[in-house]
Image (tube, rainbow, N blue to C red):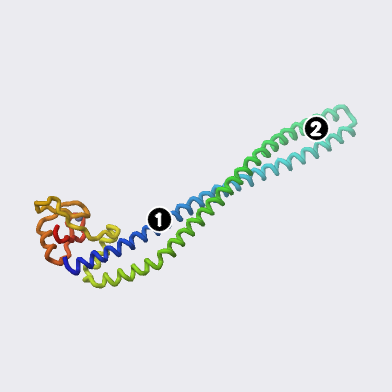
């Protein structure tokens, strides 16, 4: 043990606090993203239902128009019937009138069916609108929570970043780079303690990965301030006096 290993352990303590804050922020960011996706899906569902309602309304308008023209035509035929001169003409007009009347009845029943469909569609649109508004509210809540968390951590994070820079500056550049690389890989858990696995035997493991270490490394680190890494996990090793 010595100044370098002490500095590395100090740096790790700061690093772990930074990692913890960042992971809390990342969790909030993920929540915002997930809620945003849900809101998008709700919006798409609403648009789809609205488009279908419009389509049914257009169909209904067409049926209404058709019905009006058939009713008008039947009225004209009825008037014509009163003015016909021959039996043959009467029969022909009457047959036309009957056809028009039965067509009008068919169109009317189609229109009624569509009308029932419209009520169902309208209820669906209202439901989708409600779901979309709720999803938007939840998204806003998640965004607010993220902003609040960011604000509440901002000062501490700034302080930790400054502290980290000051402590890291005490290290050799190569060691600082190694620390950064390992921190990224192990989320701040860069330094691993050497543990003795048997009270009377020189058997040691790395606390980071539980793999065995040679007695030479353990004894070297007891007396020297060397940066040595675990051959298995790559973490920087240290040993406490009396291990
Ligand atoms: Zn290891």
Q: Which quadrant of the figure shows ligand 1?
A: bottom left
Horizontal side of residue 176 vs 88, given as left or right: left
Residue at (85%, 34%) from the top-left corner? Answer: 78
Labelled disc at residue 229: none
Along the polypeptide, which appears first: circle 2 or circle 1? 1
Q: Quadrant of residue 22?
A: bottom left
| Residue corresponding to mark 2 | 97
What residue is disc 1 on? 27
Please state the horizontal and vertical placement of residue 125, each as a whole percent of the image: 60, 46
Looking at the picture, tell me which residue is in the foreground, 151 or 137.
151
- Residue 128 located left or right of residue 163: right
Q: Nearer the viewer, mark 2 or mark 1?
A: 1
Judge: label 2 CB < 8 Å from ligand 1: no
Give SS at disc 2.
helix
Residue 43 image point, x, y percent:
54, 51
Mark 1 surroundings within 10 Å by alpha-carbon count, few (fewer than 14), some (14 through 19), many (20 or more): few
- Residue at the image position 33 percent from the left and 62 percent from the top: 17
- Quadrant the N terminus occupies: bottom left
**Residue 84: x %, y % from top left:** 88, 32
Q: Nearer the viewer, residue 50 or 95?
A: 50
- List x then y, in percent, for residue 175: 22, 67
Q: Secondary structure at mark 1?
A: helix
User: Which residue sits at x=40%, y=55%?
Assistant: 27
As drawn, 190 above or below 92: below
Is 48 positioned to the left or the right of 94 in the image? left
């Amino acid at each position: 043990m010595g100044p370098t290993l002490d500095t590395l352990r100090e740096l790790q303590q700061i690093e772990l606090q930074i990692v913890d804050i960042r992971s809390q922020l990342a969790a909030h960011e993920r929540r915002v993203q997930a809620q945003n996706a849900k809101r998008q899906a709700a919006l798409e569902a609403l648009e789809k239902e609205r488009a279908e309602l419009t389509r049914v309304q257009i169909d209904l308008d067409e049926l209404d128009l058709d019905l009006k023209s058939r009713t008008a035509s039947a009225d004209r035929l009825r008037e014509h019937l009163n003015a016909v001169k021959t039996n043959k003409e009467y029969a022909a007009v009457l047959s036309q009138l009957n056809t028009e009347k039965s067509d009008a009845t068919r169109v009317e029943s189609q229109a009624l069916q569509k009308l029932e469909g419209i009520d169902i569609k309208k209820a669906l649109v209202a439901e989708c609108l409600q779901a979309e508004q709720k999803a938007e509210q939840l998204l806003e809540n998640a965004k607010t929570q993220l902003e609040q968390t960011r604000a509440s951590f901002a000062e501490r994070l700034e302080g930790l970043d400054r502290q980290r820079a000051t402590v890291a500056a005490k290290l050799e550049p190569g060691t600082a780079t190694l620390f950064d690389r390992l921190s990224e890989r192990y989320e701040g858990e860069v330094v691993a303690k050497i543990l003795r696995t048997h009270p009377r035997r020189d058997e040691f493991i790395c606390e980071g990965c539980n793999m065995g270490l040679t007695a030479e490394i353990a004894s070297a680190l007891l007396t020297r301030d060397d940066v040595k890494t675990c051959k298995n996990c790559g973490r920087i090793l240290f040993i406490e006096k009396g291990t």
